[in-house]
Image (spheres, rainbow, N blue to C red):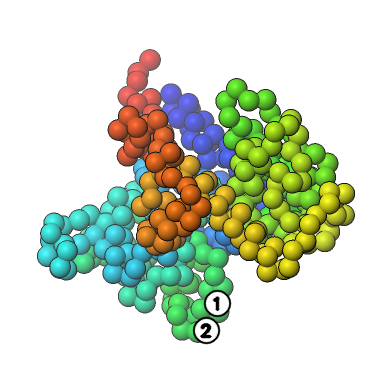
Amino acid sequence: MEDLVARLREAKASAKLVGKAPAFQQVIECLPRIATSDVTALVTGETGTGKELVARSIHYLSPRAAMPFVPVNCGALPDTLLESELFGHERGAFTDAHASKCGLIALAEKGTLFLDEVESLSPKAQVTLLRVLQDKKYRAIGSTVERTVDVRVIAATNAPLEELIEEGTFRSDLYYRLKVLIIHMPPLRDRGRDILLLANHFLKKHIPQGRELLHLSDAAQSAMLAYDWPGNVRQLENTIVRAIHMCRAKTIDVQDLGIPAMLTNGRAQPTDEPVEYGSFREMKQKVVESFESDYLKQLMQEHQGNITRAATAAGKDRRDLGKMLKKYGIDPRSYAALLARLGLAKFSYDELFNTLENLMRTITF
Ligand SMILES: Nc1ncnc2c1ncn2[C@@H]1O[C@H](COP(=O)(O)OP(=O)(O)O)[C@@H](O)[C@H]1O
Ligand SMILES: [Mg+2]
């Protein structure tokens, strides 16, 4: 039984990490050791490189796996709200605090707290976090009671923290506490043929049930290998999702990808597809729009149309996200999953998994 739970965990932790490039493999090979070490870790890398996925893998490979993994996007909320979300507050601590509320840090008890975009923490929140890391202690807003907490903190950033320290916006003592272990995620453009490996992985993952598997034409493959992928794996996944919907044949061709040849890094030969160039501005605008639209659709899919959760994950203001969805004519309601329609929207994948895992523990053979 324990073995089965362990295997389930392992499958969950590693199944989704696709890639063979040496720089990526180095990261993967360290994960089990990092997982058992229980020290604070900092994951760095551009947006979409898999920082959160790696943090989750560390958690699910660690002895804390049966306890919650709680992701917090520090850039998504204004200072005051973030602090009360993270540390909780007492009733009456501020005008809207009608009842006391437990913070995310308490929800992560005995589990892992994932602080994404950690560079956006306010100076005050930085001090509080430092205290948590040093003494495992914190106070809820408006509370005089000091609480002790047992969490592992994994932070992530795509900002140059050392520069921010020089500018005086990030505390150096917090930085040294966070970077006990540093994991750097290489950008996708430096992972060579992993681009195709990932593309095929996403083709299988996103093909609608009952539809025949699609393939990438040679020209599409060269275009993908030559492209810079500023949005990294997330952008690649969105590109594939879009291509699946655009493509009417069995083979995905360059035009189904929507990546402009002119923004490639020039390593591969241009394809023989005729490409119509507009001005740089027009082309850039098109790429940005296509990226935004794909990103939003993927985001809605991942969060089943829940704008609040999607906004938190994307690090955007809820209202701004709403406006963007409107701009691209995306209706969040159409992304509500079956579970949500059945009134079970509060179950995330993690919760379902944990429930299943707990259920399996209670079964005796
Ligand atoms: N190596 C990988 N294999 C499979 N999927 C990946 C890989 N890296 C990233 N992804 C997927 O790409 C998307 C972006 O990854 P994420 O961890 O959110 O990136 P980041 O936190 O760096 O912005 C997610 O959907 C994730 O599952
Ligand atoms: Mg992220």
Disc 2 Cβ-to-ligand 1 distance below 8 Å? no
In this view, the residue in front, 326 or 253, is 326
Q: Secondary structure at mark 1?
A: helix
| Residue linked to disc 2 | 166
As drawn, the residue found furthest toward the bottom would be 167
> Hey, which quadrant is residue 23 in on the image?
bottom right
The C terminus sits in image quarter: top left
Q: Secondary structure at mark 2?
A: helix
Instruction: Return the x and y of residue 82 as percentages of the image width and height.
Output: 32, 64
| Residue linked to disc 1 | 162
Instruction: Say which amino acid is labelled 1.
Output: Glu
The N terminus sits in image quarter: top left
Name the residue at 70% across, 63% down: 283
Q: Are marks 1 and 2 in contact (CB under 8 Å)?
A: yes
Whole-angstrom CA distance, mark 1 to mark 2, is: 6 Å
In this view, the residue in front, 57 or 147, is 57
Name the residue at 29% across, 59% down: 85
In this view, the residue in front, 149 or 222, is 222
Instruction: Say which amino acid is labelled 2.
Output: Glu
